[in-house]
Image: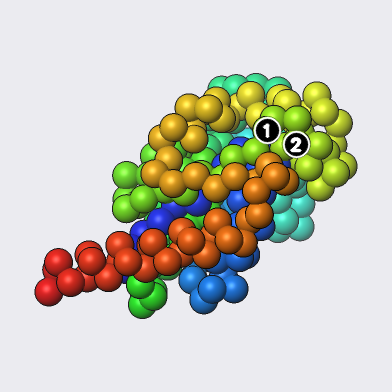
Amino acid sequence: MTLRIGLTGGIGSGKTTVAKIFELLNVPVYYADEASKNLYHTDKNLIKRMKEHFGDSIYTDGRLNRSQLAAIVFENKEKLELLNSLVHPATIAHAEEWMRVQKAPYIIKEAALIFESGSAGSLDYVIGVQAPEYLRISRAMERDGSGGETIIARMNSQIDETIKMRLCDFLINNDEKHLLIPQVIKLHEHLLTLAKNKSEGEN
């Protein structure tokens, strides 16, 4: 039985960078944020419900109008919760289907909202990628070209970072003081051992 590992972290934590290192170690990785972006255009039921709740104009020529959606949800907590209630079940179902067919000793589901979406319950362990807030803000501003206030507002829409990291089983420091690759390799070896022990226990 393949071990299911979650990988999470706040905006600008560098969780995707960590996921890419695991991929170099031949670990299959499911990118929930990328998957959800595709599902907005491929999941007919999700498209239907998006139009019902946000209006037909949320799609232009069959493509989701992201800037319009962002303007609606990031200024309205209820609308953001509504959006999450539509997208999370679709993404979780898609991830479940993907995980079911994987054959590796362990697989990783990379997602920003593992705890917020309720998907942590279907995972064996969760890895948290942590970094100081000032670094996360700086990285996100550089990556997205957004202002600091916008990034902080997005951070405030997620669970507090300290609480999130306490909920994780393993932590990786991406604070530019600790080397990332040795941390990932060490954790990779540990997860392989856990996967082997689980497999032997089931046989």
Q: Nearer the viewer, residue 12 or 185?
A: 185
**Height in image: 78 above or below 44?**
above
Residue located at (55% from left, 56% from top): 183
Neighbourhood count class around disc 2 (C-alpha, 10 Å): few under 14, some 14–19, many 20 upward: some
Q: Position of residue 145 (x, y in %)?
A: 87, 42
- Mark 2 touching mark 1, by CB under 8 A? yes
Q: Residue furthest left?
A: 203
- Image mark for residue 132: 1
Secondary structure category for the residue under label 1 = loop
**Res. 186 visible in picture:** yes
Indicate the colouring scheme: rainbow
Instruction: Report which residue position mark 2 lands on.
Output: 135
Q: Quadrant of the C terminus?
A: bottom left
Amino acid of disc 1: Pro
Amino acid of disc 2: Leu
Residue located at (52% from left, 64% from top): 185
Residue located at (49% from left, 33% from top): 164
